[in-house]
Amino acid sequence: MIQMVQIPAGEIVLRDDRFKKSWHVEIDSFRLAQHPVTQQEYEAITHKSPSSFKGNLNPVENVSWYDAIHFCNLLSLQDGLPEVYSENSDGSIIISGSDAKGYRLPSEAEWQYACQAGNVTARYGDIDKIAWYKANSGGTTHEVGQKHPNAWGLYDMLGNVWEWCHDIYNKDIYDTYRIFRGGGWNDPERGCMATNRRRSHPAFYIDDLGFRVAISG
């Protein structure tokens, strides 16, 4: 069973340095997985093992945004919850409202809010104590939960693997590109900050990109 942490309601200001803009987001209370989805958890639900760096308790990687939402739907069905995601006849993805009760990917606002855990700093501790990144990873992912958690008990929010969020980055410029956050095992120190934003096509996958699940309420 995936361990979930209750995240309190609050608010956050997001910033995009590329477009030189910032915006305010109010956050409803939600639950977020204590750590990224592991290979063991992913295989138990999907019967697939896509990761390059094998280890039951290592985070799953080489998963696209589509793979991640498929996992969310399967997990919802297993737990008797409604699916959050469905597909239109043209192949586009329909996302239920934020009050949908099934498993989903966190919004990037939820992700950053949970990562900072009540603070506005770029990191929630000394990087070597909280994250696996280029200088200490040895060129691989590591078992989740081995570094210090943040103030809300969440592990590996920075480093180990980047994490897909459900948001579209900028529809007018990048169309369906989705956001991912957090930095990974191959990133330098500056890549592992709560405020960093990256994006790619939802079919993209690579060996330093995974996800964790959220649920509303």
Image (tube, rainbow, N blue to C red):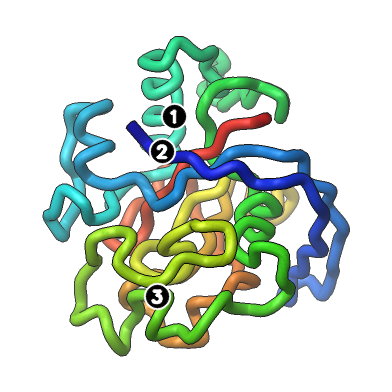
- Mark 3, residue position: 131
Residue at horizontal 87%, vertical 58%? Answer: 24
Q: Are marks 2 and 1 in contact (CB under 8 Å)?
A: yes
- Mark 1 to mark 3: distance in Å? 25 Å
Q: Nearer the viewer, residue 15 or 175?
A: 15
Tell me which residue sits at (29%, 54%) in the image: 59
Decide: is 115 above or below 37.
below
Closer to the N terminus: mark 1 or mark 3?
Answer: 1
**Which element is circle 1 on?**
helix
Question: Is 130 situated left or right of 12 in this image?
Answer: left
| Farthest residue, direction left | 54
- Using the image, determine if residue 176 lies above or below residue 184: above
Report how far apart the C-alphas of labels 2 and 1 lie in the structure. 6 Å
Q: Would you say residue 186 is visible in this rendering? A: yes
Quadrant where the N terminus is found in the figure: top left
Q: Would you call the spot at circle 2 few (<14 residues within 10 Å), some (14-19), or many (20 or more)? A: many
The residue to which callout 1 is attached is 72
Q: Are marks 1 and 3 in contact (CB under 8 Å)?
A: no
Q: Nearer the viewer, residue 111 or 49?
A: 111
Rendered position, 88 above or below 104? above
**Residue 165 shows which numbered tag?**
none
Residue 148 at what x, y percent from top left? Answer: 41, 71
Q: Residues within 10 Å of mark 1 (few under 14, many from 20)?
A: many
